[in-house]
Amino acid sequence: MTRPDDAGSRQFLHGRLTPAWITPEGPNSPVTRYTWQETSRALEAIADTADGSDVDGIVLEYTNPWTGGPVMPTIGCRVQRLRPGFEGAGRRHTASTVFSVVRGEGATIVDGKRLDWAENDTVAIPGWASYRHLNTSASEDAVLFSYSDEPVMRSLGLYRTESADPGA
C-alpha cells in the first residue's frame, strides 16, 4: 500500500473542488470511500429544501470528481431518502438496479409483486421491470443505497426509461 485508505476521500469529498496537481490514474473515481457522515449530511441538508423525484424521493448520485459522471464507467451508485408515507410513482428502465436498505421499512412493488423490506434487506430490480417504492412508516424516513448498470447501458445507447404501473 502506497497511500492511506481514506486518501481519496480526504482529497475529493469537498464539493467540486478537485486538486489541480493530481492527474487522473484511470476511469474510476479516485474516491475509495464515500463516507456515511458526508452522505447523511448531504441528505439532511437537501431534504428540507427540495421535493425530490416523484419516483425516487430525495436521490443523490455518487460521482467521479474527475468527470462529474458515475463512480465507474459501468456502475452508478445512488442514495435516496423516502420521507414518511412516501408513495413513489411507477417507473421502468433498461438498467438493472440493486437496492440495499440502509434504514427504515417499506415495500417495493415489482411487476405486481409486493416485496416488503426493512433495514439491511436487499431488493434487485431486473432491467425493464416496472417498480415503485413505498415508505410504510408514518413517522420515519427510509434510506436506500443502490447501484446500477445504467452508465454502461447509456454508453451503449441502450438506456430507456418510462413511467409504468407496476400493479398493486
Image (cartoon, grey):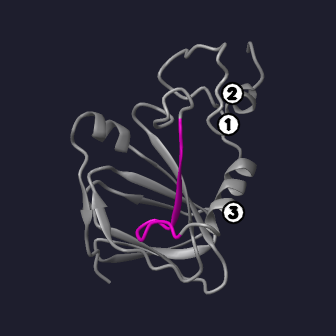
Residue at 47 percent of width and 32 percent of height: 72
Badge 2 or badge 3: first in the primary sequence: 2
Mark 1 and mark 3 in contact? Answer it, CB < 8 Å. Answer: no
Q: Which residues are magenta?
A: 51-63
Front disc: 2 or 3:
3
Residue at 59 percent of width and 80 percent of height: 84
Badge 2 or badge 1: first in the primary sequence: 2
Q: Is residue 37 above or below residue 103?
A: above
Element assignment for label 3: helix
Mark 2 and mark 1 in contact? Answer it, CB < 8 Å. Answer: yes
As for residue 124 lying within the magenta part, the answer is no
Residue at 32 percent of width and 84 percent of height: 168
Front disc: 2 or 1:
2
**Which kind of residue does numbered mark 1 sit on?**
Arg
Q: Residue furthest bottom?
A: 138
Q: Residue 33 bears which disc, if any?
A: 1
* Residue designated by label 2: 8
Q: Residue 33, how many percent across, how many down?
A: 67, 36
Q: Is residue 28 above or below residue 23?
A: below
Q: Is residue 51 above or below residue 40?
A: below
Badge 1 or badge 3: first in the primary sequence: 1
- Relative to 26, 109 lies left or right: left
Q: Residue 44 bears which disc, if any?
A: 3
Q: How many marks?
A: 3
Front disc: 1 or 3:
3
